[in-house]
Image (cartoon, rainbow, N blue to C red):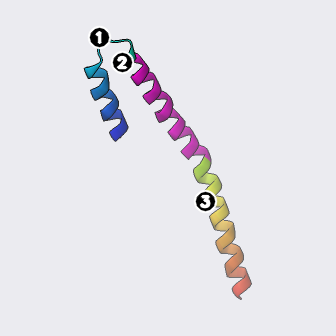
C-alpha cells in the first residue's frame, strides 16, 4: 500500500515529465507481480508446511 502512495507522490512531482508514466508503469508491474507471486506461492508454501507438520505428527506416534 505504501508503494502506491509513494508512486502517486512521485507522479505528482513529475507530472510534466515523461518519467511520470514510467513510475506509474513500474509500480503497476511490481504491484501485479506481487499479487500474482503471492497467489501462486502461498498455496505451495502452505501445502509444504502442512505436509511437514503432518509427517512430523505421524512420526511422533
Dot 3 surroundings within 10 Å: few (below 14), some, or many (20 or more)? few
Q: Earlier in the sequence, mark 2 or mark 3?
A: 2
User: Left of 3 or right of it: where is 43?
Assistant: right
Q: CA distance from mark 2 to mark 3?
A: 38 Å
Q: Which residue is mark 3?
A: 46
Query: In which quadrant of the rendered view does residue 13 lie?
Result: top left
Residue 43: x and y in percent read 61, 53
Residue 17: x and y in percent read 33, 12
Residue appearing at x 30%, y 34% in the figure: 5
Circles 1 and 2: CB atoms closer than 8 Å: yes
Identity of the residue furthest to the bottom in this view: 61
Q: Secondary structure at mark 3?
A: helix
Q: Earlier in the sequence, mark 1 or mark 3?
A: 1
Residue appearing at x 27%, y 28% in the figure: 9
Q: CA distance from mark 1 to mark 3?
A: 46 Å
Instruction: For marks 1 and 3, give the one nearer the viewer.
Output: 1
Residue appearing at x 36%, y 18% in the figure: 20
The verdict on residue 27 being magenta is yes
Query: Does 6 appear above or below 50?
Result: above
Query: Does 37 appear above or below 50?
Result: above
Numbered tag placed on residue 16 in the rendering: 1
Circles 1 and 3: CB atoms closer than 8 Å: no
Q: CA distance from mark 1 to mark 2?
A: 8 Å
Q: Quadrant of the N terminus?
A: top left
Query: Which residues make up the magenta segment?
Result: 21-40
Amino acid at each position: 500500500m505504501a508503494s502506491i502512495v509513494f508512486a502517486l507522490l512521485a507522479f505528482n512531482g513529475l507530472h510534466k515529465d515523461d518519467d511520470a508514466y514510467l513510475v506509474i508503469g513500474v509500480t503497476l508491474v511490481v504491484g501485479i507481480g506481487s499479487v500474482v507471486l503471492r497467489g501462486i506461492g502461498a498455496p505451495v508454501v502452505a501445502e509444504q508446511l502442512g505436509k511437514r507438520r503432518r509427517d512430523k505428527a505421524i512420526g511422533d506416534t
